[in-house]
């Protein structure tokens, strides 16, 4: 009896470790998602304090993020390679950042999108840098999600080797 209980515990431990390894394939995705969440939240707060009507842009981004975050939580209990809502979120974030580059260049619309900043060259460069980092990170995550979906990521190979070793 004691031996079968120990083997069940060992099986559960192995299953949990494999489940965690599959979940950790999305680790970078979760970190970048958190970064975008706080960036969009701060932008929403600043637009709200400036009484700007463009607060809807970060609100939409945050709503789409919540759907993506729910999907990420669900991935732990039921593994999937296709995190479609997360991919949609990063596509939306990518397109939004690209679109927001244009008002940053135009002096007439800069203060509409960023009323909390003074229209100076340093402010524009700051916003351009943030948007370019956002574009870069979004593109990396979209590529990462694509490789996870097609099992082309390095973690997948490690997981398969580990599964062969323990089972």
Image (tube, rainbow, N blue to C red):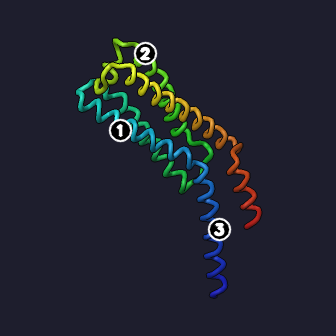
| 103 is higher (above) or lower (below) than 39 | above
Q: Secondary structure at mark 1?
A: helix
Instruction: Residue 126: give x, y in percent of width and height.
Output: 42, 27
Q: Is residue 31 left or right of residue 54?
A: right
Marks 3, 1: nearer the viewer? 1
Which residue ends up furthest to the bottom in the rendered image? 1
Q: Residue at x 50, y 25 (%)?
A: 95
Q: What residue lies at 65% left-to-right and 41% top-to-bottom?
A: 149
Q: Which mark is drawn over residue 41?
A: 1
Q: Residues under labels 3 and 1: Cα distance?
A: 39 Å
Q: Which structural element holds mark 3?
A: helix
- The x, y position of residue 74, in whole percent, is 50, 51
Residue at image position (43%, 24%) is 125
Q: Which residue is mark 3?
A: 14
**Mark with earlier residue (3, 1):** 3
Crowd tier of the residue under label 3, counting other residues whose Cα lies within 10 Å: few below 14, some 14–19, many 20 or above: some
Q: Total number of numbered labels?
A: 3
Examine the image and state in which quarter residue 16 appears: bottom right
Q: Is residue 163 above or below residue 98?
A: below
Q: Marks 2 and 1, Cα distance to the nearest angstrom?
A: 23 Å
Disc on res. 105: 2
Q: Are marks 2 and 3 in contact (CB under 8 Å)?
A: no
SS state under label 2: helix
Q: Nearer the viewer, mark 2 or mark 1?
A: 2
Which mark sits nearer the N-terminus, 2 or 3?
Answer: 3
* Alpha carbons under labels 2 and 3: distance apart: 54 Å
Residue 46's spot in the image, x, y percent? 29, 32
Residue 115 got which mark? Answer: none
Q: Which label sits in the foreground, 2 or 3?
A: 2
Circle 1 crowding by C-alpha within 10 Å: few under 14, some 14–19, many from 20:
some
């Amino acid at each position: 009896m004691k031996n079968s209980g120990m083997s069940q515990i060992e099986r559960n431990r192995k299953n949990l470790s494999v489940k965690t390894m599959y979940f950790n394939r999305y680790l970078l995705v979760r970190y970048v998602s958190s970064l975008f969440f706080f960036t969009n939240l701060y932008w929403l707060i600043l637009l709200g304090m400036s009484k700007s009507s463009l607060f809807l842009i970060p609100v939409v981004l945050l709503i789409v993020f919540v759907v993506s975050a729910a999907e990420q939580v669900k991935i732990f209990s039921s593994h999937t390679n296709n995190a479609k809502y997360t991919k949609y979120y990063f596509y939306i974030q990518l397109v939004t950042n690209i679109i927001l580059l244009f008002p940053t260049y135009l002096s007439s619309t800069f203060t509409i999108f960023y009323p909390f900043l003074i229209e100076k060259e340093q402010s524009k460069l700051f916003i351009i840098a943030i948007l370019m980092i956002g574009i870069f990170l979004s593109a990396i995550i979209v590529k990462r999600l694509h490789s996870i979906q097609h099992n082309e990521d390095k973690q997948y190979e490690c997981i398969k080797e580990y599964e062969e070793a323990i089972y």
